[in-house]
Amino acid sequence: MVFEKVDANDHEQILYCNDQSVGLKAIIAIHSTALGPATGGCRIWNYSSESEALHDVLRLSKGMTYKSSISGLNWGGGKAVILGDPRTTKTPAMLERFGEFVNRLGGNYITAKDMGIDADDLRSIKKNTSHILGIEGEKNSSGNPSPATAWGVLFGMQSCAQFAFNARSLKGMRIALQGLGSVAYSLLEHLTAEGAEVIGCDIDEATLEKAVKQYGIEIVSPDAIYDVKCDIFSPNALGATLNSKTLPRIQAKIIAGAANNQLDTPEVGYALEDRGIIYAPDYAINAGGVINIYYEAPAQGGYQKAQAFEHVKRIGQTVTDILERSRAERTPSFIIADRIAEERVNQARKLKK
């Protein structure tokens, strides 16, 4: 079963990491190193099964290959998942042991932050490997990637609005934010500053109270967010929220958000095209975080923030290019994004032969 999944997605390497003495069960997936070392964050999640964890890490690592490629980065795609509850099973010893496994890959995989992992966790991992980036608070580090991700989503949204409504800004637009995590909360600041009307949801009551107090946004339940009449629906939570059950409820002209793997199946992407909904492919619009970390360059004296955020702004042009090519070729935008990413990866593979 494992090789069937690996072959289907053309992964290069899968590493299972196991140490019962520290409670470590993890999977590292290297999708491609054609453009450079496979780079992608590590997450800890309470998966219902090992099969679910494998499915997640394979999808996420492939997404990182495409994200780096379409963003013009000389990185490949990788990802790591640790099986466990971040609130109860995560320990420094577990993370230090994980760092040993990362180090065994000799730089073919570079890890970073993802769900359930914070700066202290990254410091624990770093005790046993130098192949790690984005540790907030460290000297010359790019730190928290969320503001950069939000910055890129903002420019991607603006490009979608220009494409769909010929609008120069998001002022006056109704935007439904599904989830108010760290990326979406940074995005919320930009959207309200532009004069957008924001409707949000989240499972954390404290976050909701903060958002209402700070920005005065409207709040609905996590399920009701799909029924909001809006110009832009913005998925910023877990993946696969765009599926056969939710799609008929969405009343937006544009879908643009920071979540990974937003489409449950390719059929959903075709359905969006049939309904005339403008879709910003997730790994193209949410690439700000990995672009930001790319500019954490020790050889250049450390993190180059100005260069990083200038590159992140180019996400807007990337989204425009995808949408224009999608219209010209009468092909769904998620297919066009894949083609653009694959063209660069395939060219790099040819040069290596």
Image (spheres, rainbow, N blue to C red):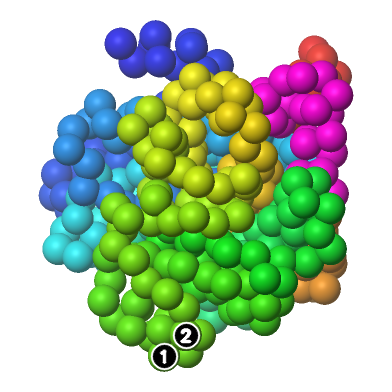
Q: Nearer the viewer, residue 50 or 139?
A: 50
Q: Is residue 144 left or right of residue 211?
A: right
**Quadrant (top left/top right/bottom left/bottom right) for the C terminus:** top right
Secondary structure of the magenta portion, mostly?
A: helix
Say which residue appears at 48% left-offset and 33% top-offset.
263
Q: Nearer the viewer, residue 60 or 158?
A: 158
Say which residue appears at 36% left-offset and 44% top-offset.
81
From this view, report whether residue 132 is shown above or below residue 35. Answer: below
Q: Residues within 10 Å of mark 2 (few under 14, many from 20)?
A: some
User: For the residue labelled by badge 1, is the local secondary structure a helix, a strand or a loop?
Assistant: helix
Over which residues does the magenta segment extend?
Answer: 317-339
From this view, report whether residue 212 is shown above or below residue 282. Answer: below
Residue 70 spot, x, y in % from top left: 75, 38
User: Which dot marks residue 216?
Assistant: 2
Could you give the CA–CA distance between mark 1 and mark 2, rounded to whole angstroms?
A: 6 Å
Residue 288 spot, x, y in % from top left: 67, 57
Q: Residues within 10 Å of mark 1 (few under 14, many from 20)?
A: few
The answer to whether one can see residue 341 in this image is yes
From this view, report whether residue 170 is shown above or below residue 128. Answer: below
Residue kind at label 1, given as amino acid type: Lys
Residue 340 spot, x, y in % from top left: 78, 28
In contact (CB < 8 Å): disc 1 and disc 2: yes
Question: Circle 1 is placed at which residue position?
Answer: 213
Say which residue appears at 63% left-offset and 27% top-offset.
273
From this view, report whether residue 113 is shown above or below residue 196. Answer: above
Q: Is residue 283 left or right of residue 14?
A: right
